[in-house]
Image (cartoon, helix red, strand yellow):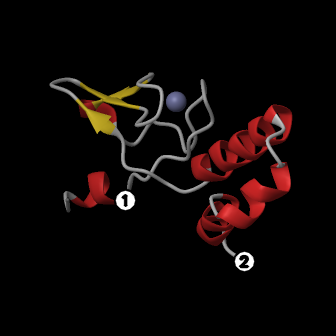
Amino acid sequence: MTNKEAIRWLHTAEILDLCNGNSKDRQAVNLAIDALRKTIPEPPYENDTMYQCPYCRRSLTYKTCVKKTYEYCPKCGQRILWWNIATGNK
Ligand SMILES: [Zn+2]
């Protein structure tokens, strides 16, 4: 099972039925979904001068310095997809 498949599974009515209306169970499922989602690389958000985390918008690097950057956001842990930035492909 991949992380994307696990996220789909955790969103199903079947798993939510297992929570049986328990708010702590639902909170745990939502935290698991959020943690799994952050392992799936996402391209950074970009403004005029900076690349930022697509999840929390923390500044990651200046656009002129892409090679010195983070694989994961140091604030929230979101995995960052840089390959399209490095190659110029969008
Ligand atoms: Zn972040």
> What is the spatial separation of the Cα atoms under label 1 and label 2, in whole angstroms?
25 Å
Comparing 31 with 74, the one in front is: 31
Estimate how packed mark 1 is, as few (under 14), some (14 to 19) or many (20 or more) residues with alpha carbons within 10 Å.
few
Q: Give the mark count.
A: 2
Q: Residue at x 84, y 38 (%)?
A: 22
Answer above or below: position of 89 versus 24: below
Q: Tag 1: residue type?
A: Trp
- Per the rendering, the mark at residue 54 is none
Disc 1: which residue: 83
Q: Is residue 71 left or right of residue 36?
A: left
Please provide percent x and percent y for residue 23.
79, 33
Q: Residue at x 37, y 59 (%)?
A: 83
Q: Quadrant of residue 4?
A: bottom right
Please provide percent x and percent y for residue 48.
15, 25
Please provide percent x and percent y for residue 63.
25, 32
- Quadrant of the frame with the N terminus: bottom right
- Quadrant of the frame with the C terminus: bottom left
- Mark 1 or mark 2, earlier in chain: 2
Please provide percent x and percent y for residue 40.
55, 57
- Kind of element beneath mark 1: helix
Answer above or below: position of 69 versus 32: above
Disc 2: which residue: 1
Q: Tag 2: residue type?
A: Met
- Kind of element beneath mark 2: loop
Q: Residue at x 43, y 53 (%)?
A: 81
Q: Is residue 49 left or right of residue 33?
A: left
Estimate how packed mark 2 is, as few (under 14), some (14 to 19) or many (20 or more) residues with alpha carbons within 10 Å.
few
Q: Residue at x 76, y 41 (%)?
A: 26
Q: Mark 2 and mark 1 in contact (Cβ < 8 Å)?
A: no
Q: Is residue 82 left or right of residue 85?
A: right
Single out the mark in the foreground, 1 or 2: 2
